[in-house]
């Protein structure tokens, strides 16, 4: 979509008041493209554009908007228009909307929502945040095991229009216990007089209402499904989670990990919508922690002041050693954090991972040491300093890579997010260790 051309065409149709052409033009735009378009036109025109959309399209567009734009739009809509939106959007989207709106807007939304839908929304709001229950929708197709394929299709045609997905249909008992799942493909290729129970899959990939939403997204990735049923303690089907919601969670979790790895508190809003003060608040705590941690490195250097004064050349190698240690630790921690996130590594694999990182560090450390020894001998003609720097590099690489392996796994074991053990926190620890090693080896070799 060429945003500039679309906005130009839209503005031209609005100004020329060609309502029929404008309506036709709007209906041909994909719903996810509307937020970017609406950001580039005046608020008065936004209301006009929105009111020209069909009920179904208006609901789709509303769900795609950012929460602040949803709030502004609600304040401009009539009660009838709000009813139309709430009748068309899915329950999981309705819950997301209500969770993000201020209380006065929530009251107006609920006042214009059907009583049966209000009941469902209240039930979904009871589930803790970040659980499968808070993520699911109650709009799914359910079938009975003794239905024929022909009867199943009649049921799907009757109820399917208001359901979030019809690809998977869930077979339930009278008391709504989950027996199996049957997909549309299986129904299409089956004989019309076959029973649903004979073609359903009883090995159902499912989750429970209190499962962590991040664990649920891993199930989508592992089993390549488009929806996962959510059951309660009695195995009663209470909802489903669809792939579009799982993708949203994946994006949120990835962004959160990215921010933690950069030593920032996760932000709830986008970059430009987060205030300057909040940006500063999210960063300053970790920066203070890292600054205080870095003081330890300064204290170590100060403690070895006599060694530095007797051999000033040593100081010039500190940045290189610290940088190498931090980089090596970051490499290992990144791979371990990724492995933990993808379930390739578990906490019980700590010694296996350490052994692997140790062998890698030996190869890397020796390679770096050889290059540095050759450089220092050629540049400074001092074999002793070359030996000290090279030996320090080997030990620094080994310790940094082991720290990069151990700390994320330890965080996972302690029920913390492994991402907090990534750079720059790990870099600060590696800096301290590498400087301490450097001066201990220097003292031993030069008798300082």
Image (cartoon, helix red, strand yellow):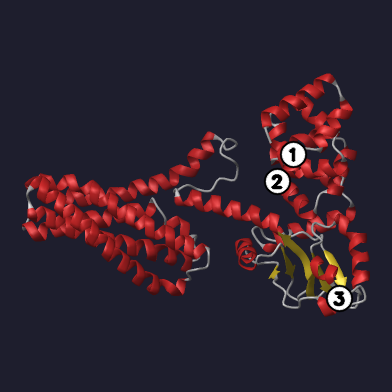
| Residue 343 placement (x, y as % from top left) | 52, 67
Residues tagged 2 and 1 counted as in contact (Cβ below 8 A): yes
Residues tagged 2 and 3 counted as in contact (Cβ below 8 A): no
Q: Nearer the viewer, residue 406 or 114?
A: 406
Q: Nearer the viewer, residue 156 or 83?
A: 156
* Residue appearing at x 20%, y 54% in the figure: 371
Q: Residues within 10 Å of mark 3 (few under 14, many from 20)?
A: many
- Label 1: which residue? 70
As displayed, is residue 182 above or below residue 439? below
Q: CA distance from mark 1 to mark 3?
A: 42 Å
Name of the residue lying farthest toward the bottom: 198
Of callouts 2 and 3, the N-terminal one: 2
In the picture provided, is 141 more to the left or to the right than 344?
A: right
Q: Residues within 10 Å of mark 2 (few under 14, many from 20)?
A: some
| Residue 166 placement (x, y as % from top left) | 82, 61
Asked whether the viewer can see residue 75, the reply is: yes
In the picture provided, is 381 more to the left or to the right than 132?
A: left
Label for residue 196?
Answer: 3
Label for residue 219?
Answer: none
- Where residue 433 sits, quadrant-wise, is bottom left
Q: Nearer the viewer, mark 2 or mark 1?
A: 1
Q: CA distance from mark 2 to mark 1?
A: 10 Å
Of callouts 2 and 1, the N-terminal one: 1
Q: Secondary structure at mark 2?
A: helix
- Label 2: which residue? 100
């Amino acid at each position: 979509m060429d945003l500039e051309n679309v906005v130009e065409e839209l503005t031209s149709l609005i100004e020329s008041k060609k309502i029929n052409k404008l309506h036709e033009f709007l209906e041909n735009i994909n719903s996810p493209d509307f937020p970017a378009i609406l950001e580039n036109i005046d608020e008065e025109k936004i209301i006009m554009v929105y009111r020209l959309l069909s009920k179904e399209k208006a609901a789709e567009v509303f769900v795609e908007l950012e929460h602040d734009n949803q709030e502004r739009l609600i304040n401009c809509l009539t009660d009838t228009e709000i009813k139309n939106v709430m009748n068309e959007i899915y329950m999981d989207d309705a819950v997301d909307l209500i969770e993000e709106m201020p209380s006065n807007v929530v009251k107006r939304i609920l006042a214009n929502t059907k009583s049966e839908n209000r009941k469902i929304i209240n039930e979904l709001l009871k589930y803790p945040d970040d659980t499968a229950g808070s993520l699911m929708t109650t709009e799914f197709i359910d079938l009975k095991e003794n239905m024929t394929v022909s009867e199943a299709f009649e049921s799907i045609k009757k109820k399917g229009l208001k359901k979030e997905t019809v690809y998977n249909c869930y077979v339930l008992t009278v008391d709504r216990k989950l027996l199996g799942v049957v997909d549309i493909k299986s129904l299409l290729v089956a004989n019309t007089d076959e029973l649903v129970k004979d073609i359903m899959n009883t090995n159902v990939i499912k989750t429970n209402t209190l499962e962590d939403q991040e664990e649920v997204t891993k199930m989508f990735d592992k089993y390549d499904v488009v929806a996962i049923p959510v059951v309660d303690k009695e195995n009663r089907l209470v909802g489903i989670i669809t792939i579009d919601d799982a993708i949203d969670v994946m994006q949120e979790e990835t962004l959160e990990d990215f921010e933690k790895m950069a030593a920032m508190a996760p932000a709830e809003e986008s970059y430009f919508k987060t205030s300057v003060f909040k940006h500063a608040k999210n960063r300053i705590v970790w920066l203070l922690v890292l600054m205080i941690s870095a003081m330890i490195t300064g204290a170590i250097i100060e403690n070895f002041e006599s060694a530095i004064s007797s051999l000033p050349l040593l100081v010039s190698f500190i940045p290189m050693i610290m940088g190498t240690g931090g980089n090596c630790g970051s490499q290992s921690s990144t791979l371990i954090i990724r492995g933990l996130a993808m379930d390739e590594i578990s906490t019980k694999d700590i010694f296996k991972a350490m052994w692997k990182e140790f062998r890698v560090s030996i190869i890397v450390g020796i390679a770096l040491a050889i290059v540095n020894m050759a450089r220092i001998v050629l540049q400074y003609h001092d074999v002793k300093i070359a030996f000290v720097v090279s030996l320090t590099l080997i030990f620094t690489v080994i310790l940094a890579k082991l720290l990069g392996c151990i700390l994320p796994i330890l965080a996972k074991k302690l029920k913390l997010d492994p991402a907090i053990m990534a750079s720059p926190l790990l870099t600060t620890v590696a800096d301290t260790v590498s400087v301490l090693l450097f001066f201990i080896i220097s003292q031993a070799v030069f008798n300082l």
